[in-house]
Image (cartoon, rainbow, N blue to C red):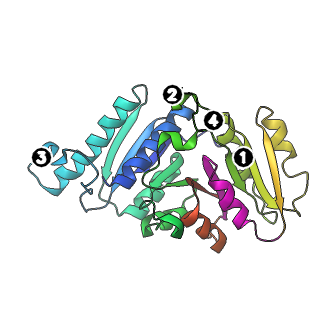
Amino acid sequence: MSTDTRTITVGIDGSRSSLDAADWAAREAQRRRLPLRLLHAGTEPAVSGGVRDIDALADIDGPAGRTRAALDRAAIELSYAHPALDIIARRTATPAVPALLAAAVEAETLVLGSRGRTGSAGFPVGSVALGVAARAGRPVVLVRAGELPEDERVPVVDGSPPSTASYLPVVLGLDPDASADDLIGYAFDTAAVRSAPLHVVHPWTLPTSTLRPWRHRFPGTTVREHRVDGDPGPRLLEASARAGLLVVGRRTGRGPGRAARSLIRHAGCPVAVVPHD
């Protein structure tokens, strides 16, 4: 991974979805020992429905005050939950997509919220999230509303605190036709940061040498390969139900392909979309 990026950045609009994404981003920033950046973009006020007592915090200048209150409330709540975390809150009038794309340049990872759980039909992903995930030069993680800290860990059965449980696997969907060092590197690095196993789903045609250098670079990461005939999508969806994060790639200069878009909508865990050559 690049060492010149300095933040985990999350888009905030005050909605429940964005606040859950911010909580995920705070945990990721803490794992990676990076500052957390909260960013509200656009001229519209932040949505207030997901933030408690927001009207009491708002200034008399109307929408701008409510936006500041949403950011302040999110920063305060996250600072209580993660007291050692360096949190930066910023608002810009630049429209959301260009502002988030610009922020991604300086971020290790950009985190965005979806619109929540909708059962077997999957969950809708807004135009901003899809637009940013299709064009950002850095990994973009999409987090659905309702995602909880314990959802990324092995279920606790002995009454111990959920925060002490091991992390669920990171799942990587790998296309053998792509030169995907950035994609593979992100998946291995994320698994190593969590001390989680890495499960790689790929077609039978993947050369055995593809993962060899990464195994040597990350000797402490347990790697399991799942070779499938034909479309790996169903296997990835199945694996995502028991994963902490699903990692998929997109070619630089292109949006996520049809298979990746389906995974984004239907996966049972947060999805990282990683650009690669």
Q: In which quarter of the image is residue 223?
A: top right
N-terminal-most mark, 3 or 4: 3
User: Camera-side residue: 233 or 90?
Assistant: 233
Where residue 275 appears, as percent x and y from the top left, is 64, 59
Calculate the distance from the C-alpha at mark 3 to the C-alpha at mark 4: 41 Å
Calculate the distance from the C-alpha at mark 3 to the C-alpha at mark 2: 40 Å
Calculate the distance from the C-alpha at mark 1 to the C-alpha at mark 4: 14 Å
Is residue 128 toward the left or the right of residue 204 in the image? left
Residue beneath label 3, please?
59
N-terminal-most mark, 4 or 2: 2
Residue beneath label 1, please?
185
Q: Which of marks 2 and 1 is in front?
A: 2
Q: Which residue lies furthest to the right in this view?
A: 208
Mark on residue 85? none
Residue found 87% across the figure and 45% down from its top: 212
User: Camera-side residue: 137 or 20?
Assistant: 20
The answer, for residue 255, to whether it is visible in the render is no
Magenta-highlighted residues: 230-251
Amino acid type, label 2: Pro
Quarter that holds the N terminus: top right
Residue beneath label 4, please?
194
Residue beneath label 2, please?
161
Does 232 lie within the magenta span? yes
Where residue 92 appears, as percent x and y from the top left, is 31, 54
